[in-house]
């Protein structure tokens, strides 16, 4: 009995953990110096940690945050939101425009700007949510609308320009806080992760979301409102998207509707899938998706370190990702389980022996 | 009956994680016999069939099929078919939007060009031969379920099967259709086909079967000639105990007497799917809604629970007016509802047994008041034990349990909320005799503990045994109410047919 318990706990994370382990090992063999962490002084005179590991964890922040929200939407609705990058850019634009409208950039106005962009991102995501939950439109189709026009809306918000914001607060948010050697976006991931953990701890969000995702008719007959749960998942995704938009904007010190969070929707869906989550909805593991996000970033950084032409990186990434996703597929899993039984016949026969007793 | 064996299975073993599904099971099928495979849910019938049809690989044992030298190696449904083993499943697996002939020959036409005219002619011949009332060019969906079932059998027979497996073929058929199907089975038997018949209906077993093999807990209990095994004995063999339980139940049924307090009362309640009706139930009363399929009995209880859109009427609980427009309202007012379709509306298949048990209570406590883990575990343990739910662990996905155990999990879910009024719509459908009895006993026990229960079942005897009042429906209207001495099968039939207003 304890055996099956352990399996269900780790089973889903096994493939992404193995994938991450192989990537780590590969880099260790390729270049033992890959993992060296140093301390350097950056442009603003702060002491900061440097090295590939720090850079991977730092650059994956936006992806990890969005992947968390994407996991919830996937679980509740059995589909994905492909407008996260576009809405993230809208959120970034609102953030910048609010700051521009205020006379000065200080903690107060930054908080105001964060609230404003959060509200707008939630509003846009709620629009998606209404299409999916109330009108029962396929999530991919419903979110295609904002996917195609979101970046234009962002461009319109910033007044057809690429506005820059320059302030110590902004660079502290996008890079490092003076005196703290760890890049700030990493704290962003931790913060969002903590907020979600608290939500899961003190509400029934997980049980309700999984019930709706597996069988919404039965969930309704047990008093759950599937529409509300689906909307809620989009609202939470909205908050994640706003956070990612703000981090991305602060990192660049500007909003560019062409490059901010570009292609992140596909990576986020991929992170959810690599994390072993069922894209058809139901049970989910947010930790898996976060792991998926770091695997994707690790892959990019590894390829860059190998001096692969950035233009070709996507092709190499695709090959590796195909392997990871196939390793996690039910067919390969069943084959691996069979192989395992053949290699370790004594455990199999022991299990049968137990059954007889 | 002395015909030689077409199929011999010896020492079949099959292990699933956590359970031994089959342990050294033997099964023999002779040419031209109808052989019933009996057992409670989880006894291993389905597993044995799936091993035979190549859906599951066996862990041990041997299978011999007439006409194949040595051991038959069946690793896929295709292998089974090539060995002459055909299966017709409970759910019809044909394509409803194709014609009868297309359904009979799809996937086994030869060459790139298909001359459907020829196939239609062949199909007509077979249908005629077997006396199946369907035309080759008719769309399958336009045939009754029984005829669709028979077309599936015709397809199997035409593939020269020696062994025909019928898995719960009668569960969605009415009496006349069952008779038609039995006619076909007897006809095939005369032609030398060996038929394995899996069903829950005891009377049907005796109507057609020559032999009966009984399984229990994955083990062979024995093989018997149907003529030498009385029905009571069969039930005893399946359950592994004698039938004191049955008599005990009858005594229980007479004991329970409802109180006076009206727990639930509806006046002119109507929903998007049901006509306006009035209904009341007293404390500790077991009542039933009966009527033919589609008479509105399920729709009425759905309206009570707020499962469909409520369009009118007023409802009182314990004499106080309440508003019930959605399931959550009903739950807050102390109503529980076990839906008719367990798979579609009841279980949340991928979630664990534990989550499925605590779900309703958790929802009633509210979104912001999650239970502690230890509390969930305790509730799950308590009800797994109380209802004797057979599961590998609390973490097992409920979808992997047998039908009867899934039903018990949903029962546990509602019992945990301690409702004043529990609605059970077909709680015993597709469930083995043993679990059926357990559920009936439970209903009577709950009534003794002052719970009001509405019990709906397609089997009238079951309702007569448990209910003290029967509401008879026809064409979405209540046409009668039977109590006391009127609770006889004949009277129920008469009321359903004639609609005598009481």
Image (cartoon, coloured by chain):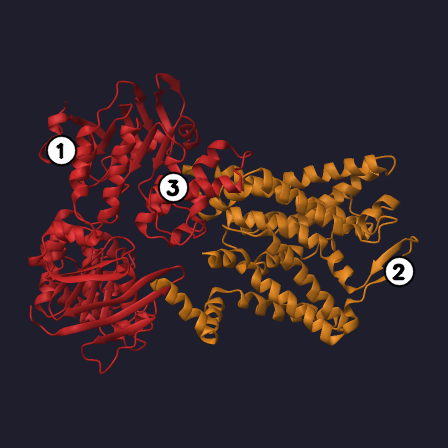
Chain colours: A orange, B red
Q: Residue at the spot x=17%, y=34% of the render?
A: B251
Q: Chain of mark 2?
A: A
- The answer to which quarter of the image holds residue B254 is top left
**Residue B58: percent from the left, percent from the top?**
33, 70
Q: Which mark is residue B160?
A: none
Check the image and report above or below for A67 versus B116.
above
Residue at image mark 1: B492
Between B342 and B404, the residue placed more toward the observer is B404
Camera-near label (2 vs 1) is 2
Residue at image mark 3: B383
- The answer to which quarter of the image holds residue B444 is top left
Residue at image mark 2: A40
Q: Secondary structure at mark 3?
A: helix
Camera-near label (3 vs 1) is 3
Q: Is residue B384 left or right of residue B240?
A: right
Q: Is residue B31 left or right of residue B96?
A: left
């Amino acid at each position: 009995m304890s055996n099956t318990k352990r399996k269900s706990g780790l089973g889903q994370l096994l493939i992404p953990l193995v994938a991450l382990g192989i990537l780590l090992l590969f880099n260790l063999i390729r270049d033992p110096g890959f993992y060296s962490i140093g301390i350097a002084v950056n442009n603003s005179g702060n002491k900061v940690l440097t090295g590939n590991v720090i850079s991977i964890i730092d650059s994956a922040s936006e992806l990890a945050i969005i992947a968390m929200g994407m996991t919830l939407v996937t679980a509740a609705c059995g589909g994905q939101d492909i407008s996260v990058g576009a809405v993230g850019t809208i959120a970034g634009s609102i953030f910048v425009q609010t700051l521009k409208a205020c006379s000065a950039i200080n903690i107060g106005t930054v908080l105001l700007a964060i609230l404003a962009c959060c509200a707008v991102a939630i509003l846009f995501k709620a629009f998606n949510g209404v299409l999916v939950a109330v009108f029962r439109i396929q999530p991919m189709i419903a979110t295609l609308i904002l996917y195609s026009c979101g970046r234009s809306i962002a461009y319109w918000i910033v007044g057809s320009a690429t506005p820059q914001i320059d302030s110590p607060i902004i660079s502290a948010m996008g890079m490092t806080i003076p005196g703290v050697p760890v890049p700030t976006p990493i704290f962003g991931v931790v913060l969002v992760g903590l907020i979600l953990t608290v939500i899961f701890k003190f509400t029934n969000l997980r049980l309700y979301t999984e019930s709706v995702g597996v069988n919404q008719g039965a969930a309704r007959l047990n008093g759950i409102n599937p529409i509300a749960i689906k909307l809620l998942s989009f609202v939470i995704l909205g908050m994640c998207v706003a956070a990612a938009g703000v981090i991305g904007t602060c990192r660049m010190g500007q909003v560019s509707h062409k490059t901010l969070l570009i292609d992140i929707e596909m990576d986020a869906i991929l992170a959810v899938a690599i994390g072993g989550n069922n894209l058809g909805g139901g049970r989910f593991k947010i930790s898996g998706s976060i792991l998926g996000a770091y695997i994707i970033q690790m892959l990019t950084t590894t390829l860059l370190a190998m001096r692969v032409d950035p233009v070709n990186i996507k092709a190499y990434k695709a090959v590796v990702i195909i392997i990871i996703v196939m390793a996690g597929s039910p067919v390969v899993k069943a084959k691996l389980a069979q192989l395992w039984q053949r290699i370790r016949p004594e455990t199999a026969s022991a299990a049968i022996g137990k059954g007889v007793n | 009956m002395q015909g030689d064996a077409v199929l011999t299975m010896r020492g079949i073993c099959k292990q699933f994680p956590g359970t031994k599904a089959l342990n050294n099971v033997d099964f023999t099928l002779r040419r031209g016999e109808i052989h019933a495979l009996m057992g409670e849910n989880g006894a291993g019938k389905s597993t044995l069939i799936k091993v035979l049809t190549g859906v599951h690989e066996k862990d041990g044992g041997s299978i011999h099929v007439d006409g194949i030298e040595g051991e038959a190696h069946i690793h896929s449904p295709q292998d089974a078919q090539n060995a002459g083993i055909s299966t017709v499943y409970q759910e019809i697996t044909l394509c409803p939007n194709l014609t009868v002939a297309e359904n009979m020959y799809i996937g086994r036409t030869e060459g790139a060009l298909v001359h459907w005219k020829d196939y239609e002619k062949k199909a007509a011949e077979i249908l005629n031969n077997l006396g199946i009332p369907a035309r080759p060019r008719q769309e399958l969906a336009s045939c009754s379920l029984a005829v669709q079932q028979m077309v599936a059998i015709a397809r199997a027979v035409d593939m020269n099967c020696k062994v025909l497996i019928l898995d719960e073929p009668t569960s969605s058929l009415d009496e006349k259709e069952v008779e038609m199907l039995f006619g076909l089975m007897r006809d095939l038997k005369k032609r030398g086909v060996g038929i394995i018949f899996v069903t829950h209906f005891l009377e049907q077993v005796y109507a057609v079967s020559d032999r009966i093999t009984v399984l229990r807990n994955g083990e062979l209990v024995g093989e018997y000639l149907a003529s030498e095994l009385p029905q009571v004995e069969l039930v005893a063999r399946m359950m592994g105990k004698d039938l004191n339980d049955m008599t005990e139940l009858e005594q229980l049924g007479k004991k329970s007497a409802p109180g006076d307090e009206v727990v639930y009362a509806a006046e002119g309640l109507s929903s998007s799917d049901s006509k306006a009706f009035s209904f009341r139930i007293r404390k500790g009363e077991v009542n039933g809604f009966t009527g033919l399929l589609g008479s509105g009995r399920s729709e009425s209880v759905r309206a009570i629970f707020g499962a469909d859109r409520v369009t009118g009427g007023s409802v009182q609980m314990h004499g106080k007016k309440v508003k019930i427009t959605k399931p959550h309202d009903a739950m807050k007012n102390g109503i529980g509802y076990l839906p008719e379709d367990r798979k579609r509306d009841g279980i949340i298949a991928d979630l664990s047994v534990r989550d499925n048990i605590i779900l309703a209570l958790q929802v009633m406590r509210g979104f912001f008041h999650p239970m502690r883990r230890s509390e969930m575990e305790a509730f799950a343990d308590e009800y797994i034990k109380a209802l004797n739910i057979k599961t590998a662990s609390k973490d097992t996905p409920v979808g992997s349990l047998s039908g009867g155990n899934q039903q018990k999990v949903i029962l546990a879910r509602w019992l945990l909320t301690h409702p004043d009024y529990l609605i059970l719509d077909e709680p015993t459908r597709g469930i083995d005799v043993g679990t059926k009895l357990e559920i009936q006993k439970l209903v009577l026990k709950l009534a003794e503990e002052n719970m009001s229960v509405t019990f709906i079942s397609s089997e009238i005897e079951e309702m007569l045994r448990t209910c003290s009042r029967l509401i008879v429906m026809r064409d979405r209207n209540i046409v009668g109410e039977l109590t006391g001495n009127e609770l006889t099968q004949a009277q129920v039939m008469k009321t359903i047919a004639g609609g005598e207003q009481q």
